Amino acid sequence: GNSVTQMEGPVTLSEEAFLTINCTYTATGYPSLFWYVQYPGEGLQLLLKATKADDKGSNKGFEATYRKETTSFHLEKGSVQVSDSAVYFCALKTDRGSTLGRLYFGRGTQLTVWP
Amino acid sequence: ETGVTQSPTHLIKTRGQQVTLRCSSQSGHNTVSWYQQALGQGPQFIFQYYREEENGRGNFPPRFSGLQFPNYSSELNVNALELDDSALYLCASSGGGAETQYFGPGTRLLVL
């Protein structure tokens, strides 16, 4: 089946610390991979995506590389800010390239950044 | 360009009642997906609509039903509400040849 496993939270960091949130997946076929972010009381915002092996998605200082050999898509940021405090969701979509098809989400990782 | 909008933002119902949630897709998007997000969990897929037809359904009972209209807006209907239906309901739209799903702000439903 299709599933996403994220590292357990919460993650608490000081401002300017390095962030890694681990994400591994199981998929039938060749999925597209996504990171979404959810700020308190809001819906999900797309943070970045990658659609094929070795692609690197990046946005707002966040990066993640699609690793097919390890079925992983770990999220990293070199220097976090207080404004990065949110819940981060890793997701996959098996209907790669199509507007159709569902997303499979991990459970989410809560990140809190202290000044 | 208008993003995905949902209404209402919050709703309180009692067990056994029925509820209708609404979603307007982003301009140019013809596909709408609905997800349920329980507290502290990741979103779970309910169903997807493409050109007014259901295109895939998750593990939800038939009392969860939906519609898509010619303008691609959509409704989610839940009958015979249960306490466990309390959650954030998210709508996402996609289209224009791209696979990325863009989410609305959600409707928070509380069932008492």
Image (tube, rainbow, N blue to C red):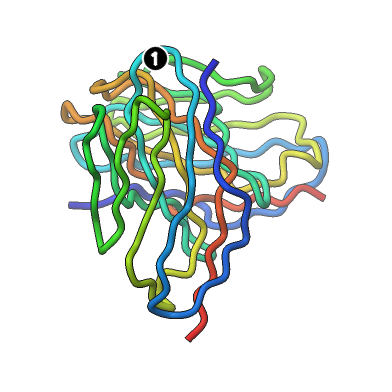
Q: Nearer the viewer, residue A86 or B76?
A: A86
Residue occupying image coordinates x 36% and y 40%: A34
User: Does A26 sit above or below residue A72?
Assistant: above
Q: Position of residue B80 (x, y in %)?
A: 77, 30
Say whether residue A64 is left or right of residue B41. left
Residue A42 image position (x, y, % from top left): 48, 60
Closest to the observer: A40 or B1?
Answer: A40
Q: Nearer the viewer, residue B53 or A85?
A: A85
- Chain bearing tag 1 is B
Quadrant of the image occupied by residue B97: top left
Q: Please name the residue that numbered disc 1 is placed on.
A: B53
- Looking at the image, is A34 positioned above or below residue B56? below
Q: Residue extending furthest front?
A: A69
Type of amino acid at the residue the image marks with label 1? Glu
Q: Which of A23/A103 is in front? A: A23
Question: Tag 1, which secondary structure?
Answer: strand
Q: Residue at x 23, y 23 (%)?
A: A97
Q: Relative to B21, is A17 above or below?
A: below
Residue extending farthest bottom: A115
Percent across and percent down for residue B79 are 70, 29
The quarter of the displayed image where residue B37 is located: top right
